[in-house]
Image (tube, rainbow, N blue to C red):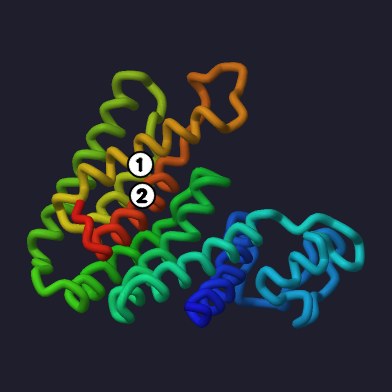
């Protein structure tokens, strides 16, 4: 459990940097980590997941600039995924859940912050689904899963295009149908209605607690984030013996 949490926190640190740099067009693999406020190169002691944030009180030691809370959120979530996957599930099952969740984590954070679901991450998620599914489930039927993914994507895409055609504006991002299709390669087809229901309920909750704009009709909901969180919960509950 502790090793899973440690691994998750380390991966979460990388995911946090990815979510902060990628939207700005900055490479996460090139160059050394530095403070976004003053540009100071960070030492190894300033890059320890979670611990450095607590010791430095969430600020740069040199200029005092606040560290973006996305970094902390990614490290906490990554560690929680590792603890939940390897602490409460068998090793192989936990590894599969961890892989799915760690791929989903940057999608969840990027959609929440920027309403952006990068195709490269969705493709990675979709490619890993059948591999992990065949490894984990003896009843995994690749053809059935592909049909479910195609049907799910088509339904979402038709809804998205229909809304734009009738209302003259986008009501759903182009990445949401792709993400739903990718998740359909991970979850049993009978779980997909629960995925949609759970994501919708979570979206309504987010809508009610986020700062509202003057015109509520223009407020956006990060549906991709809601789909990702719900998929992780459904996968975990299914593997704990409560079927969806």
- Asked if marks 1 and 2 touch (Cβ < 8 Å), the reply is yes
Residue that mark 2 sits on: 230
Residue that mark 1 sits on: 199
104 or 181: nearer the viewer? 104
What residue sits 31% from the left and 26% below the top?
163
Local crowd at mark 2 within 10 Å, few (<14), some, or many (≥20)? many
Q: Position of residue 219 (x, y in %)?
A: 52, 27
Q: Quadrant of residue 99?
A: bottom left
210 versus 222 height, above or below:
above
Q: Position of residue 77 (x, y in %)?
A: 53, 61
Q: Position of residue 50 (x, y in %)?
A: 67, 69
220 or 164: nearer the viewer? 220
183 or 191: nearer the viewer? 191
Determine which of the numbered discs, if any, sits on residue 91 in the image: none
Q: Is residue 230 shown left or right of residue 14? A: left
What residue sits 58% from the left and 76% below the top?
10
Kindly report the distance in space between the C-alpha atoms of the residues bearing marks 1 and 2: 6 Å
Q: Position of residue 194 (x, y in %)?
A: 24, 44
215 versus 229 height, above or below:
above
Nearest to N terminus: mark 1 or mark 2: 1
Q: Secondary structure at mark 2?
A: helix
71 versus 201 height, above or below:
below
What residue sits 36% from the left and 49% below the top?
230
């Amino acid at each position: 459990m502790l090793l899973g949490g440690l691994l998750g926190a380390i991966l979460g640190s990388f995911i946090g940097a990815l979510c902060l740099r990628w939207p700005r067009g900055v490479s996460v693999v090139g160059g050394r980590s530095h403070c976004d406020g003053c540009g100071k190169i960070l030492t190894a002691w300033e890059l320890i997941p979670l611990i450095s944030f607590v010791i430095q009180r969430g600020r740069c030691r040199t200029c005092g600039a606040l560290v973006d809370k996305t970094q902390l959120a990614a490290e906490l979530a990554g560690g929680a995924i590792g603890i939940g996957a390897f602490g409460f599930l068998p090793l192989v099952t936990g590894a599969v859940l961890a892989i799915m969740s760690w791929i989903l984590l940057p999608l969840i954070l990027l959609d929440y912050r920027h309403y952006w679901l990068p195709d490269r991450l969705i493709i990675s998620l979709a490619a890993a689904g059948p591999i992990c599914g065949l490894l984990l489930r003896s009843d995994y039927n690749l053809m059935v899963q592909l049909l479910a993914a195609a049907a799910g994507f088509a339904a979402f895409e038709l809804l998205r295009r229909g809304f734009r055609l009738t209302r003259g504006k986008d009501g759903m991002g182009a990445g949401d149908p792709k993400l739903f299709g990718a998740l359909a390669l991970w979850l049993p087809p009978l779980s997909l209605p629960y995925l949609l229901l759970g994501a919708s309920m979570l979206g309504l909750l987010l809508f009610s607690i986020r700062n509202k704009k003057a015109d509520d009709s223009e407020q956006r909901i990060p549906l991709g984030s809601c789909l990702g969180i719900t998929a992780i919960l459904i996968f975990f509950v299914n593997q704990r013996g409560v079927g969806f």
